[in-house]
Every structure is written in structure tokens, then in C-alpha cells.
Image (tube, rainbow, N blue to C red):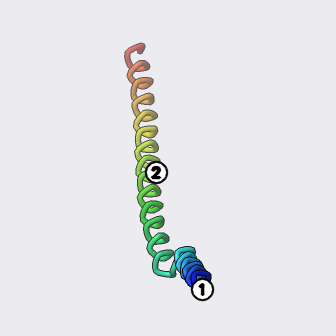
Amino acid sequence: MIKFLYIKKQKKSILLHNKQQRGFILIELMVVVVILGLITLGLVTFFTGGTKSWVAGQSQLVAQRNARQAMDRMVRE
């Protein structure tokens, strides 16, 4: 009788262990994909904005450099 209860308890423990060891369900994976997509979208937007700002800054720098050179020429003449 004790052995039977022990085997029954072991069997129940194995069944519970198997339920806990299941993989992810489709909904969980879809939620993770959506979250990662939103994070990626945010990072791409951040870097795109940074790149646009850098390009605008560089063009402004070139314009200022050209204006200084023109002013230097006008002062010399």
C-alpha cells in the first residue's frame, strides 16, 4: 500500500513537472515579437533622427565656413 502511494505520488510529480516544462504558446511568442518590433521601431526612429540632425549640422557647418571665407576675401580686398 505504501509503495502504491509512493508510485502514485511520483507519477503525479512527473505529470506536474511535464506541465511546467512546456514550451511557449503562440500568443506569448506573438507578444514578444510585437514588443521587439516596437523596440526596434523606436531605435530606428532614434537613429534616423540623429542622422538627419548630423547631416543638417554638417551642411550648416559648410555654409558657415563658406561665408567666413567670403568675408575674409572681402576684408582683404
Q: Quadrant of residue 69?
A: top left
* Whether label 1 touches label 2, CB < 8 Å: no
Tell which tag, 1 or 2, sits nearer the viewer. Answer: 1
- Give coordinates of residue 2: x percent, y percent: 57, 81
Label 1, secondary structure: give it. helix
The amino acid marked with disc number 2 is Phe
The residue identified by callout 1 is: 4
Instruction: Specify few, some or many for label 1: CA neighbours under 10 Å numbering under 14, 14-19, or 20 or more.
Output: few
Residue at the location (40% across, 45% down)?
A: 53
Residue at the location (40% across, 24% down)?
A: 68
Residue toward you, 49 or 69: 49
Identify the disc placed on residue 47: 2
Query: Taking 37 as reference, is 3 above or below it?
Result: below
Identify the disc placed on residue 26: none
Instruction: Specify few, some or many for label 2: CA neighbours under 10 Å numbering under 14, 14-19, or 20 or more.
Output: few
Q: Is residue 36 visible?
A: yes
- Give coordinates of residue 14: x percent, y percent: 59, 78
Query: Taking 14 as reference, is 43 above or below it?
Result: above
The amino acid marked with disc number 1 is Phe
- Give coordinates of residue 72: x percent, y percent: 41, 18
Label 2, secondary structure: give it. helix
Which quadrant of the figure contains the C terminus?
top left
Residue at the location (51% across, 80% down)?
A: 25
Using the numbered discs, state the Cα–Cα distance from disc 1 to disc 2 in whole angstroms: 65 Å
Is 25 positioned to the left or the right of 50 in the image? right
Residue toward you, 27 or 55: 27
- Give coordinates of residue 60: x percent, y percent: 40, 37
